[in-house]
Image (cartoon, rainbow, N blue to C red):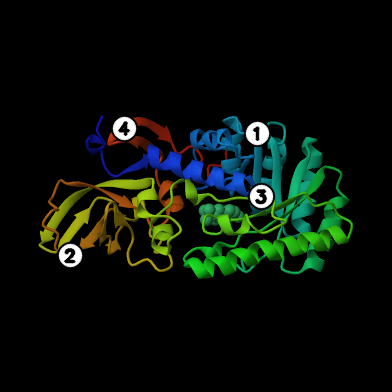
Amino acid sequence: MHIHDLPTPALIVDRKRLKDNLERMAQMAEAAGVKLRPHIKTHKSPFIAHWQQKLGADGITVATIDEAEVMAYNGISDIFMAYPVAERHRAERLARLGRLAAVSAGVDSKTGVSILAEAADKYHTRVGVLIEVDTGLMRSGLASPSEVIELAATISQSPNLELKGLFTHAGHAHGEHAEGRQTVGRQEGEITVAVANALRAAGFAVSEVSTGSTPSAAIVAQVPGVTEIRPGTYAFNDGSLATSGVASWEQCALSVLATVISNPVPDRFILDSGSKSLASDKQRGMPGFGTIKGETAKSISWLNEEHGVIQGSFPDLSIGDKVEVIPNHACTAVNLFDEYYLVEDGIVLARMPVAARGHRHLI
Ligand SMILES: Cc1ncc(COP(=O)(O)O)c(C=O)c1O
């Protein structure tokens, strides 16, 4: 089947571009001597997660317990939930998953540690723990080394918890251009390594110093002491990464196939892909809500749920045409679809489930 025979809107993954993206990051990590633990929140696909493992990744990262369960049930054997555990539901499901896979979780509070310890005790499993360090994003995570040491002491009192080390996410590297990324990436690595050294000096073993997103991965991988990187979006890339120069437009593997369904005035074209297929993320530095593949002059100016509006006079566009829109933010667009089509040279190779999307509370 040709891609243009698909019903729209449809989520498209270009197999060759995906393969190149996966291989490039795996090679970079190997050359830098750091482990790669890809964040699967971007693709939510066990098929791609296994591909990443075959290329040398050491386990995966997830954000939600649903993602962790779907990946474990599909045979992924080493899962880190890089999200602060602080309530019983997530903690118990993760601890129970410890029977199927090696599991670890992020914490940044004593409440989280005690809930996780109780859950691991209840299910007789051993859960790895990484303390989250805030390296400037100002989201979750502790900024003070003394608080990290205090939390490590609490963790060490629980026989079913194993302190593995520290993790951080410098999400503010997104939207930064080359120079800003260098600054954010170096800080991300250097601050986390400094806290790890303070923890070691206080007598704790620290085996993992886990950092690095798509924009900062290549930078933090060069910081001595960093052991692991956790990029996710690199699998697909997106408009935001292409605009800030982290990737090229030709390295964007994900698109939403859409049909032009209206052209009521000469300079306005309406696509059948609105916020329910592209997401309404504008992203830092982005002019619109998505960009037409191969034609960066055409972008989605505004969205309603089922309408994506391209403003401008484009004699090459007509009602019925199919176009591919590269989303600003790959992860949120993927989360809106149940399935994606794997495509090569315009031919549909497979229809794959976006198996770990949404919050489904599998039990
Ligand atoms: C904790 C954590 N680690 C890693 C990542 C991966 O970052 P990116 O998708 O920019 O590669 C994210 C993304 O949100 C994250 O929240």
The quarter of the rendered structure image containing the C terminus is top right
* Label 4 to label 3: alpha-carbon separation: 35 Å
- Element carrying mark 1: loop
Across and down, in percent, residue 278 comes to 35, 53
Mark 1 neighbour density, 10 Å: few (under 14) some (14–19) many (20 or more): some
Quadrant of the displayed image that contains ligand 1: bottom right
* Residue indicated by mark 4: 348
* Residue indicated by mark 1: 77
Q: Are marks 4 and 3 in contact (CB under 8 Å)?
A: no
Mark 3 neighbour density, 10 Å: few (under 14) some (14–19) many (20 or more): many
Q: Depth check: 235 or 159 in front?
A: 235
Q: Does the rendering let one see residue 164?
A: yes
The part of the image, by quadrant, that contains residue 241 is: bottom left
Nearer to us: label 4 or label 3: 3
Q: Give the residue at x 64% y 53%.
A: 83
Across and down, in percent, residue 283 comes to 42, 64
Q: Does the rendering let one see residue 40?
A: no
Q: Give the residue at x 86% y 54%.
A: 204
Residue type for callout 2: Gly
